[in-house]
Image (cartoon, rainbow, N blue to C red):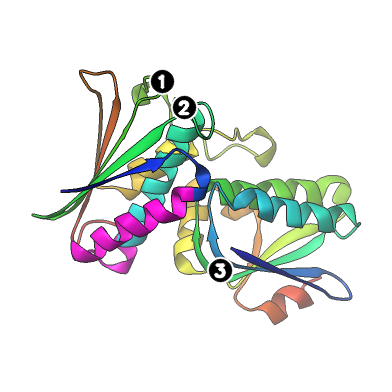
Amino acid sequence: METVVFPGKFAVLADISSFVTRAAVEAGLDHEATYAVQIAVDEACTNIIEHAYGGEGQGSITCSVETGGTGLTVILTDTGKPFHPEKIRDPNIKVPLSKRKERGLGLYFIRHYMDEVSFEITQDGSNRLVLVKHRGGRG
Amino acid sequence: MDITTTPYKRCTVIKVSGRVDSSTAPKLLEAINQIQHEGQYRIVIEMDAVDFISSSGLWVLVNSQKTSKRYNRGEVILACLPEKIHASLELAGFVPFFKMFPDLTSAVASF
C-alpha cells in the first residue's frame, strides 16, 4: 500500500488524480475503469473539502492506494465533520432544471462509478472511505 | 484547463481543454458569464479536448444554460462531446437540457 497526504485544497485535486491514475494503470484497469476511479476520487475529495472541512485549507486528505488482487482499492481519510452517507439520498434526476438542487450528485457518482463503496468512522474519529474498482468490472 | 473564445456572427464558441474540476470549474463559469454579460447568449461549448469533468463542471454547463435560456434570449449547445462525458451527463440527468452536435460546424450552423 502506498500513502500520500494531500492538503485539503481544490488545487491539488489534479495531483490526487495523477496519484490514483498511476495506481489504476498499475492495477491493470482499462481506460473506462480508470476514468471511473478518477471521477469517484475527485467527487469524494471535493465532498471532504466542502462538507467535512467546510472549506479549503482546513485539514488534510490521506490517500492510500492498493493494487493487486482483483483491481484497485483507494482509501481516503479525513479528520473533518463526521460523515453519514446513509443520510444522503440520491438526487431526483427526473425533475425540471429549475427544481434540481446542486447537492448529492457527488455521492451518487461515487456509488455508480465504483464497484464497492464502504464508509466508517474510525476509533480516532476520522472519516474513512474505501473505494474498490475491479479489473474488468462494470464501468 | 484552457479556454479559447471565438466570436462568430450568430454565436460564440468556447473551446475547453484539459481538466474541469472544483478548482477550475469557477474559471469556466466566469468565462461563460462574461460572454453572457456582453450580451451574447448563443454559445457553443466545444468539448473534444476535455480530459475530465466532475459534477462541479457539469453544474457550470447547466447553470450557464439556465442563464442563456432565461427570457428566450439564447441557448448553450454542446459540440464534440467525448463518450465518457456524455455518460456522466446522462447519469446526472442533464442530457435533456442540451442540444448536442457531433461536430463544430453543425453546432454553429444550428443558430
Cα separation, mark 3 vs mark 1, equals 37 Å
Q: Which structural element holds mark 1?
A: loop
Q: Which amino acid does label 3 sit on?
A: Leu
x, y percent for residue A80: 40, 24
Is the magenta region chiefly helix, strand or loop?
helix
Q: Name the residue under label 1.
A: A81
Circle nearer the viewer, 3 or 1: 1
A117 displayed left or right of B65: left
State the extent of the magenta-drawn residues as a range: A12-33
Q: Which amino acid does label 2 sit on?
A: Tyr
Q: As displayed, is residue A39 above or below residue A136?
A: above
Q: Residue at x 37, y 23 (%)?
A: A83
Q: Which structural element holds mark 3?
A: loop
Q: Residue at x 32, y 68 (%)?
A: A31
Q: Residue B81 carries which label?
A: 3
Q: Residue A53 carries which label?
A: 2
Q: Do the residues labelled 3 and 2 touch (CB within 8 Å)?
A: no
Q: Is residue A76 magenta?
A: no
